[in-house]
Amino acid sequence: MESFYRTHTYLVEHTDAPVRRALMDEIDWNDRLIGIKGTRGVGKTTFLLQYAKEKFGSDRSCLYINMNNFYFSGNSLVTFAADFYRHGGRVLLIDQVFKHPDWSPELRQCYERVPGLKIVFTGSSVMRLKEENSDLRDVVKSYNLRGFSFREYLNLQAGLSLPAYSLEEILTAHEPIAQDILSQVNPVTYLGDYIHHGFYPFFREKRNFSENLLKTMNMMIEVDILLLKQIELKYLPKIKKLFYLLAVNGHKAPNVSKLAEEIQTSRATVMNYIKYLTDARLINLIYPQGEEFPKKPAKIMMHNANLLYPIYPVAVDEQEALETFFVNALWKDHRVNKGGNGSTYLVDDSLSFRICSENVRIRNNPDVYHVHHRWERGKNNQLPLWLFGFLY
């Protein structure tokens, strides 16, 4: 146990979390079993350590452990949790819980056998804690940690503490909101860098960002998808090739029959792989209003704009990058569908948006919000794109 405490103390003391994530205040920390899901690279480990540092400091009632530790290859998580509680432990932070083979039933046993213990664990976005997990469905509270919003990135880079705004606030009061922000910083000068490399917190590391992101993307497929979905290793090349084809084909409806032919599998398997890539937060599926999976989407796009550049950097389409930024910003709290009648996207079944690159001519339509790249401020139903990066 002492070796775990030594590791915990070292990690907490050396945690570098310059941006306090908004999720920290959204979680009800009174719940006894809390799952924090998120795609690889968004900072789940740092989030756990930041929570430990902020709420407990050097208090030994809180302990961080990682399921990568070989100790858990031969020891039960339930036994460890009970022993930790007997020694005064009250909050157990478990990182990468899915690395433990019996993580789900053992978490359930911890919940039932050690009622005085609170457990907070992290896992992959591929994990379906509510939909597919009968062990935890009725006891776990699940949350999603996303990558940096543009607001969080801007606060970090400019040394500010700008607040988030709801979509309603942005649409009804975007002019005074923009004016207030512009009095402190010009977000337009930061937007291009964010679209290229600002979503994943590891852009701060002194390593080649694109190479690091490529490694992360491969791990999403090789570990998060194959391990958690229990797919045989021999199918890995097919999934990777499918992801590549979807990426380079741009924002359009997939030709499922052609994709099935190219990766030599069935149409049904292609659709299953597309769902896995969506769960891993590698792609987003855009449907016409009223439709959803397993129907074929109206278009497929990367989950966030950063993913566009390592795959095919010489051919990144600006319009696609801007739309990917917009959809990713809305995805957290809003439903995004394919638009119609001159709009690009329909949000929450009622709001129409058109994303406009620099040289697009606009015919004014009061029923459509026009979102402009490079605009510092807007007027009426014409809004600057950067402002949608303040939704969380």
Image (cartoon, helix red, strand yellow):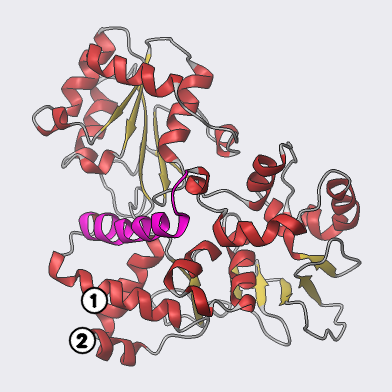
Q: Which residue is mark 1?
A: 238
How far, Cα to Cα, is label 1 from label 2?
8 Å
Graded by Cα atoms within 10 Å as few (under 14), some (14 to 19) or many (20 or more), the crowding at tag 2 reads few
Residue found 23% across the figure and 59% down from its top = 229
Magenta span of residues: 206-227
Q: Position of residue 52 (x, y in %)?
A: 45, 22
- Whether label 1 touches label 2, CB < 8 Å: yes
Q: Write the residue at 15% across / 30% down.
A: 72
Disc number placed over residue 264 in the picture, else none: 2
Mark 1 or mark 2, earlier in chain? 1
Q: Position of residue 354 (x, y in %)?
A: 73, 77
Query: Residue furthest toward the top?
Result: 87
In what element is the residue under mark 1? helix
Residue 330 visible? The answer is yes
Would residue 371 be found to the left or right of residue 267 on screen?
A: right
Residue 142, image x, y percentages = 43, 42
